[in-house]
Image (cartoon, rainbow, N blue to C red):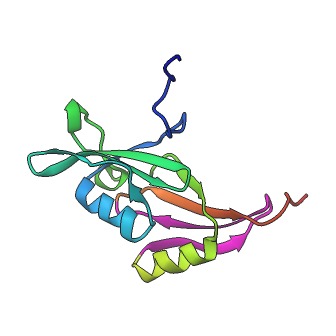
């Protein structure tokens, strides 16, 4: 048997986010966005250095600003807008929205049916990343 080119259960593409406080980000993604930790975070000096989280089939990784010699900053700390949006499918986007809103999420766009066949909403996380959560509701509109 040959070894796989990637770890079992991991997708081939995983966004890696630079966050200002991994402890706060992990709590935000768990409480507001309903992500789960996939493994124990890597801890250094009593702070999370690296964490892996999942929601359904989606996986994200995150690391602290300055971790491993990096000079990357989160969008919020750098004062710039994140150059990408993260788009995740969930079984019930309206329930996900209600949960996020109840838990204090900064909602950028309320749920809406879109021309491409998805119902989606958008929130901004504590580091300034834009997250789109969607449920496919029909075929693309022409």
* x and y, in percent, of residue 26 in the image: 31, 59
Rendered image quadrant of residue 90: bottom right
Which image quadrant: the C terminus? bottom right
* x and y, in percent, of residue 50 in the image: 27, 43
Looking at this rendering, what residue extends furthest in the right direction? 142
Left or right: 39, with 21 as reference point: right
- Residue 90 visible, this angle: yes
Looking at this rendering, what residue extends furthest in the bottom direction? 102
Q: Nearer the viewer, residue 37 or 64?
A: 37
Left or right: 71, with 33 as reference point: left
Identified at 64% across, 66% down, the residue is 91
Looking at this rendering, what residue extends furthest in the front direction? 1
1 is higher (above) or lower (below) than 106: above
Was residue 120 drawn as part of the magenta stretch in this picture? yes
Q: Nearer the viewer, residue 10 or 129?
A: 10
Identified at 44% across, 47% down, the residue is 60
Segment colored magenta? 105-126
Identified at 51% across, 59% down, the residue is 131
- Residue 21 visible, this angle: no
Was residue 31 drawn as part of the magenta stretch in this picture? no
46 is higher (above) or lower (below) than 6: below
* x and y, in percent, of residue 141 in the image: 87, 60
Q: Nearer the viewer, residue 25 or 107?
A: 25
* x and y, in percent, of residue 115 in the image: 80, 62
Identified at 47% across, 75% down, the residue is 100
123 is higher (above) or lower (below) than 55: below
Left or right: 18, with 1 as reference point: left
Our reading of the magenta stretch's main secondary structure is: strand
């Amino acid at each position: 048997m040959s070894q796989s080119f990637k770890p079992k259960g991991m997708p081939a593409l995983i966004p890696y986010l630079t966050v200002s406080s991994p402890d706060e980000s992990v709590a935000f993604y768990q409480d507001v966005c309903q992500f789960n930790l996939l493994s124990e975070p890597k801890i250094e000096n009593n702070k999370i250095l690296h964490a892996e989280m999942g929601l359904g089939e989606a996986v994200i990784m995150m690391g602290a600003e300055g971790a491993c010699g990096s000079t990357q900053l989160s969008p919020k700390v750098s004062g710039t807008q994140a150059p990408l949006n993260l788009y995740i499918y969930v079984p019930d986007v309206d329930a996900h929205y209600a949960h996020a809103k109840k838990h204090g999420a900064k909602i950028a766009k309320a749920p809406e049916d879109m021309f491409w066949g998805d119902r989606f909403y958008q929130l901004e996380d504590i580091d300034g990343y834009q997250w789109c959560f969607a449920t496919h509701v029909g075929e693309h509109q022409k």
